Image (cartoon, grey):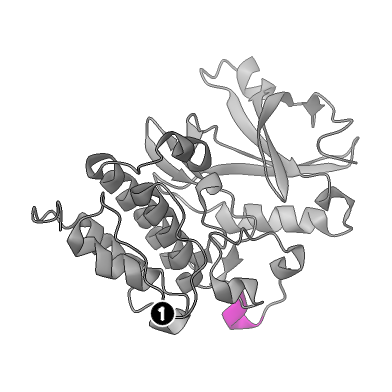
Amino acid sequence: MSAVTALPCLLAGRYQLERILGTGGMGVVYRGRDLLHEAFGEPDCRVAVKLLGDTLSLCADAHVLLYSEFALTRSLRHDHVVRVFSFEVDTDHQLAFFTMEVMPGLTLDRMLPECPQGLPWHALQPMALQLLDALDYTHRQGVLHGDVKPANIMMGEQGVRLFDFGLGHAEVQARAGLPSLSRSRLNAWTPAYAAPELLAGGAPSASADLYGAACVLYELAEGRRPGNRQGHQRLPRPRQLPRHCWSSLCSALAMDPEQRTVGIAELREAFADRRRRWFLG
């Protein structure tokens, strides 16, 4: 059954669906209410409910893919990473789903068109640090995001929230040689933010996450995407970006992963630098 069409308003006798919050290549997220918590007087019963999208819901093993995303993120506890709650199955309608926190705010892909000249440094810096903090944390937990792009980053009152690990990967599984689902067959990466090696069929990696984050940071600073580059074509330094950040960001944006000589922590250190000699030139 499709997650969008013919969807019941109540899942598992507990979750009341209210409206769609967002859709992607793999899933649909609804805003809902947890009626069980509401019945016991919980002050905030809002939840986000993620189900498979129309296309994937027709695949025989799609529910495994959904559970894989839940399993990947259920132990993550960080202020700038979405928190997931539980994986459940509505047996009456044969629908698998998981619940997570509701994130008020705007995704960056909706915010960026309002900033065609890029964000000023005082607004950009905290967003950059929070995004890089989130990625550094998930990588230290052995989790690769796999699809870092503006549509998967929420900006709200609490700052940045990284979400949608549907193309994510657990490094421990790969090292142990354990079987895992092949995300590459989904062809779901967004070319403007996916590292070239991913588009060529390579495996997710910390370097690929770094490249995606660097593309997002460049767009936040410049107001446009880095775009496709051939050979050693150089990008112009965004006017909003301090000089001392540029060499590190350039390295993270390298098309060849062998030339990405910085990591997430090093890029964060460059953006955290509070030197004042950056304005122009």
- Seen as rendered, the residue at the extreme left is 276
Measuring from the top left, give residue 50's x and y in whole percent: 69, 40
Specify whether residue 174 is painted magenta: yes
**Residue 109 vs residue 49, the one in the foreground:** 109
- Which quadrant is home to the N terminus? top right
In the image: residue 224, left or right of residue 29: left
- Which quadrant is home to the C terminus? bottom left
* The image quarter in which residue 263 lies: bottom left
In the image: residue 178, left or right of residue 273: right
Q: Which residues are magenta?
A: 173-177
User: In the rendered image of this protein, does residue 1 appear above or below residue 188?
Assistant: above
Which residue shows up at 40% across the image and 61% down it?
214
Measuring from the top left, give residue 149's x and y in whole percent: 52, 53
In the image: residue 274, left or right of residue 65: left
**Residue 18 vs residue 142, the one in the foreground:** 18
Q: Which residue is mark 1?
A: 232
